[in-house]
Amino acid sequence: MEKHADILSKNPHELYYLRMQRSREKMERGESEDQHLLQKRLRVCVATCNRADYSKLAPIMFGIKNHPEDFELEIVVLGSHLIDDYGNTFRMIEQDDFDIGSKLHTIVRGEDEAAMVESVGLALVKLPDVLQRLNPDILIVHGDRFDALALATAAALMNIRILHLEGGEVSGTIDDSIRHAISKLAHYHACCTRRAEQHLIAMCEDHSRILLAGCPSYDKLLAKQHQDDYMDIVKSWIGDVKENDYIVALQHPVTTDIQHSIKIYGLMLDALLSFNKKTLILFPNIDAGSKELVRVMRKKGIEQHPNFQAVKHVPFEQFIQLVSHAGCMIGNSSCGVREAGAFGTPVVNLGTRQTGRETGENVLHVRDADTHSKIYHALELQFGKRYPCSKIYGDGNAVPRILKFLHSININEPLQKTFCFPTVKESNSQDIDHILETQSALAVDLGGTNLRVAIVCMRGSIVKKYIQSNPKTYEARISLILKMCNDAMQDAVRLNCRILGVGISSGGRVNPQEGVVLHSTKLIREWSSVDLRTPISDALHLPVWVDNDGNCAALAEKKFGHGKGVESFATVITGTGIGGGIIHNNELIHGSTFCAAELGHIMVSLEGPECSCGSYGCIEAYASGMALQREAKKLNDEDMLKMEGMKMVEPVSAIHLISAAKMGNSKAQAILNKASTALGIGIINILHTVNPSLIILSGVLASCYQAPVQRVISERALSSAQNIKVVTSDLEEPALLGAATMVLDYTTRRIY
């Protein structure tokens, strides 16, 4: 309290300098402590689970042991090292004069998938006590075994730094998933190949924490490749045999397809029996399915066969000599695609366990090893050959690099690992409206007069529209479509719209499956048997959908209009021509030859006016804009169209006829009545054929026809169809919206 009072009695300037002095002293003390910590020995725990990973870890362990001034080594042994059936391989660690700090019995016997899971669980139960007691600065784990996953999980959760060896590689089984999971838990990486390094970077690992070291086992095998007593080693394991005149076989189960593994194993043994060469065969590892493989081996009498020596384990230094001087190695062990390449030993790799591994030219893959003869033929091709030595996985200097890397680790830097994600565009908003508006489609409407392109968002809003006169020739039309689409795509970037694809609405008969306009209307010349999808998709690098304009209008109503939530309805377009589309049980009807819903060509009279299709009495010949214009011209020529106060602007059109009818022109009223009746009868035919629950009139003439058509239905339809409603569309651009719907519904996985 007195000290506190003394501080308060000082003036503000004195307080400031006092605080600065204490802060400086604290920093100096901290720097001194950091230097002391950096100078202390790094406590490294190496955990080994089986004979295979020990061959990679042992060189590092020797390196650490030989630098006691820099490192303090702790060793944890677990997994199959401690099982008699797999050779009690922990003894070779002791023979190498290493002190094992902890032995953990973590394997639950059973050799099936459940046993593997239980083994991981048992390891997770036992590891915390050991790691807490050892309190290492860093834990070194290797590879892709389920035991290693347990080690990495426990260490990560206990805030222990992890160095992962051989991450970033690809092999093609569940091992890939385990290996990549360990990489994500690890803080540092020592990988073997340039491709593995690139894979780790692609997985967003920090490049500064990745060491391209090479495989540690290469340090030993390249140094001891030409051992003088190699033939003594060969004869001690295989018997009296010549160099390059025997086979080494090592096949493990593939846990994702155990039954297929058993089959391949049996075929391999059959091929080896037929090949009739001395063979050293090693027991498989402890993965699920190994018990079944051993059973197959014993059923075929391999252990008693004079050509075979079946062993559970061979010390790595001796195994190097056996592989180096073999006539061939066969199976699916990683040793075949990694270490054997350093000697140029020919290898027959069976099945998918090493799919994706980098290999030298010494490896012949038999991935679909489904017959004895195929494997036998591969042995014939490979046995006795010698290949150039490959150093894909190392140059013999991995251990010095790894020790230097370990020495550079600052244990005072933050433990929390960071990921180096690629740069992505920052989202302006997480609001659902923003997301909906961003996903968009390019919609194209090929009309008789104009060519229109629009950017349409997910909510059905037209963000921007482009209109040009439709050229008369095919070449000019395609060229203009591409130009307008490219302009729209450039604007889409600025408007924050992601274009998902292109939808095209065209008049005429269309094959939507192939994206081809089969036959067009007379209004669009040179537009038959035209493949729209291919040239536009190739030029824009986007998926393209094509359909008839009437079908597009129906799709637009289904997604954005009166048809939303309606299972069955028909859309009738009343414009220059008459068209439409039918949705039945939520599906758009195309028909066997893509002419379903050609509603304008439903005949309502045996002897009616000629239609543009060449027939007579079609709805289009009575009720289309062209038909009304034809009748308006006739009345005008007879001077029977114009009414008092009515403005006439050339050319005469359907609008003039409608205006005259509204002003009381009986001739015009009679023509419209006849057109409405023809349209109504045609729609009644639709009601009696597919029985939709709603009729939607679209186009410029829709409002004119709605009431008369409803009346015709109520008077002439069957009683069960008389009350079906006729409504006018609220959509301003049904063709464009329908074209966009093809894109938006498909790319967002809705049914079309």
Image: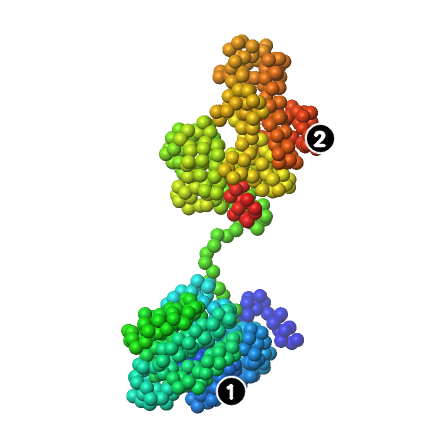
* Nearest the eye: 144 or 131: 144
Residue 468 is situated, as x and y percent measured from the top left of the image, at 44, 31
Name the element at disc 2.
helix
Towards the viewer: 596 or 577? 596
- The one nearer the camera, 105 or 34, is 105
Residue under numbered circle 1: 84
Residue located at (42% from left, 66% from top): 368
Distance (Cα) linking label 2 and label 1: 87 Å
Q: Residue at x 53, y 38 (%)?
A: 591
* Label drawn at residue 719: 2
Residue 435 locus on image (x, y percent): 55, 48
Q: Quadrant of the C terminus?
A: top right
Please say whether residue 5 is visible from this viewpoint.
yes
User: Which amino acid, mark 2?
Assistant: Ser
- What residue type is disc 1 on? Asp
Disc 1 crowd rating (10 Å Cα; few below 14, some 14-19, many 20+) is few
Residue 309, placed above or below residue 209: below
Left or right, 605 with reference to 28 = right
